[in-house]
Amino acid sequence: MQCPRCGQANPETAQFCTRCHAPLRYTCPACKHVQAQGGKCEKCGVDFAKYLGVLLAQSKIESDRQRERVVRRSNFFKQILLLPITGGLSLIRYLFSRGRSE
């Protein structure tokens, strides 16, 4: 297989050029079809950039949810630890403020 960027001859099994490290084969992220050019999948028609953008957006949403869950849990435990000091007033205020915001 010849590299489209530098013209170097590469073995047929190579994923990247041995000289310039340019990708020689592209794998579709949706159907795993292997092809010689990027952009759109020849088999299922998926645009690689859009597909990966959607995956990144889903990953960010999930990480934001997990972070929010951790913040809420840590705030609750902080209020529990402050019970002896505040006499429970801060916990009551915290619980009522959460009820109004949700």
Image: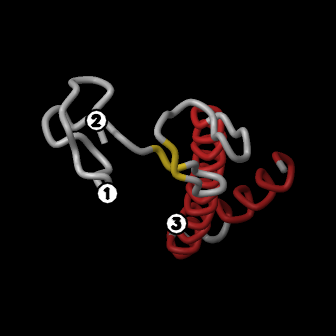
Residue appearing at x 58%, y 74% in the figure? 80
Question: Is 34 rendered above or below residue 69?
Answer: above
Q: CA distance from mark 3 to mark 2?
A: 62 Å
10 Å crowding of disc 2: few (<14), some (14-19), many (20+)? few
Mark 3 in CB contact with mark 2 (< 8 angstroms): no
Question: Is 31 rendered above or below residue 24?
Answer: below
Q: Nearer the viewer, mark 3 or mark 1?
A: 1
The residue indicated by pointer 2 is 2
What's under tag 3, amino acid-wise?
Answer: Lys
What's under tag 1, amino acid-wise?
Answer: Thr
The residue tagged with tag 3: helix, strand or loop? helix
What mark, if any, has residue 66 been given in the picture?
none
What's under tag 2, amino acid-wise?
Answer: Gln
The residue tagged with tag 1: helix, strand or loop? loop
What mark, if any, has residue 13 been given in the picture?
1
- Check the image and tell me how it is coloured: secondary structure
- The earlier-in-sequence mark between 2 and 1 is 2
Relative side of 34 to 9, left or right: right
Relative side of 19 to 14, left or right: left
The residue indicated by pointer 3 is 78
Where does residue 44 sit, x and y in percent of width and height?
Answer: 73, 46
Mark 3 in CB contact with mark 1 (< 8 angstroms): no
10 Å crowding of disc 3: few (<14), some (14-19), many (20+)? few
Mark 2 in CB contact with mark 1 (< 8 angstroms): no
Residue appearing at x 28%, y 32% in the figure? 3
The residue tagged with tag 2: helix, strand or loop? loop
